[in-house]
């Protein structure tokens, strides 16, 4: 696979509006967009930081994956996302390398790009996402 860089870093937050304001006022960062996925129980805000983004993730219900993450670990770093040129190839290579995939097939992400997640236990405890760029 070919990594094109760190695409974004996912940060779990309890209050999305408050967190957007914090990133804007404390860091001068810019809100790119907000998106909500009821099925996954998440609402996200993408913060532009220059060359990469911070994806602020909040739970729309406590039993969603982000809701469970927040209950277990509290707010903080959630995942690292790498850009890849060919996500099907990246998944095939990750599988061949013995990584445990959360998504066996790429799916549409909130960015409007194809994404897939790798289980944190395969990569030193870091939930890892690939984003096709
Ligand atoms: Co992400």
Image (cartoon, helix red, strand yellow):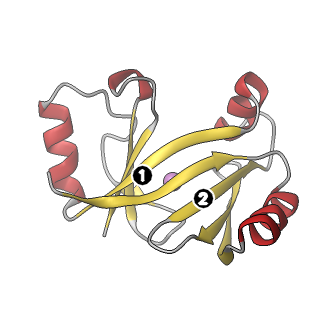
The picture places residue 85, in percent across and down from the top left corner, at: 20, 65
Residue shown at the point (79%, 50%) measured from the top left: 60
Helix, strand or loop at mark 1: strand
**Could you tell me which residue is drawn at 22 percent across and 45 percent down?**
91
> Which numbered marker is on residue 2?
none
Considering only order in the chain, which callout, 2 or 1, is on the residue closer to the N terminus? 2
Q: Is residue 107 above or below residue 104?
A: below
Mark on residue 81? 1
Indicate if the residue with disc 1 has its beta carbon within 8 Å of ligand 1. Answer: yes
Q: Image check: 35 left or right of 85? A: right
- Left or right of 110, for residue 59: right
- The answer to which quarter of the image holds residue 6 is bottom left
Q: Is mark 2 within 8 Å of ligand 1?
A: yes
Is residue 50 or residue 118 the one in the foreground?
50
* Residue 13 left/right relative to 15: left
- Judging depth in this view, the residue of 114 and 77 nearest the camera is 77
Give the residue pinned by disc 2: 55
Q: Residue at x 64, y 36 (%)?
A: 65
Q: Is residue 81 above or below residue 126?
A: below
Rendered-image quadrant of the C terminus: bottom left
Q: How many marks?
A: 2
Tag 2, which secondary structure?
Answer: strand
Residue 69 in percent (x, y) is at 68, 31
Q: Nearer the viewer, residue 100 or 16?
A: 16
Badge 2 density bin: few <14, some 14–19, many ≥20, Cα 10 Å: many
């Amino acid at each position: 696979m070919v990594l094109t860089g760190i695409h974004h870093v996912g940060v779990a937050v309890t209050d999305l509006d408050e967190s957007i304001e914090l990133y804007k006022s404390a860091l001068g960062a810019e809100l790119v967009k907000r998106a909500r996925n009821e099925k996954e129980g998440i609402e996200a805000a993408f913060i532009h930081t220059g060359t990469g983004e911070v994806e602020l993730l909040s739970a729309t219900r406590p039993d969603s994956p982000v809701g469970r993450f927040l209950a277990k670990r509290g707010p903080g770093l959630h995942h690292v996302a790498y850009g890849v040129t060919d996500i099907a190839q990246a998944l095939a290579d990750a599988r061949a390398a013995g990584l445990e995939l959360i998504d066996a097939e790429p799916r549409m992400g909130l960015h409007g790009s194809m994404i897939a997640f790798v289980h944190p236990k395969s990569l030193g405890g870091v939930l890892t996402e690939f984003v096709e760029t």
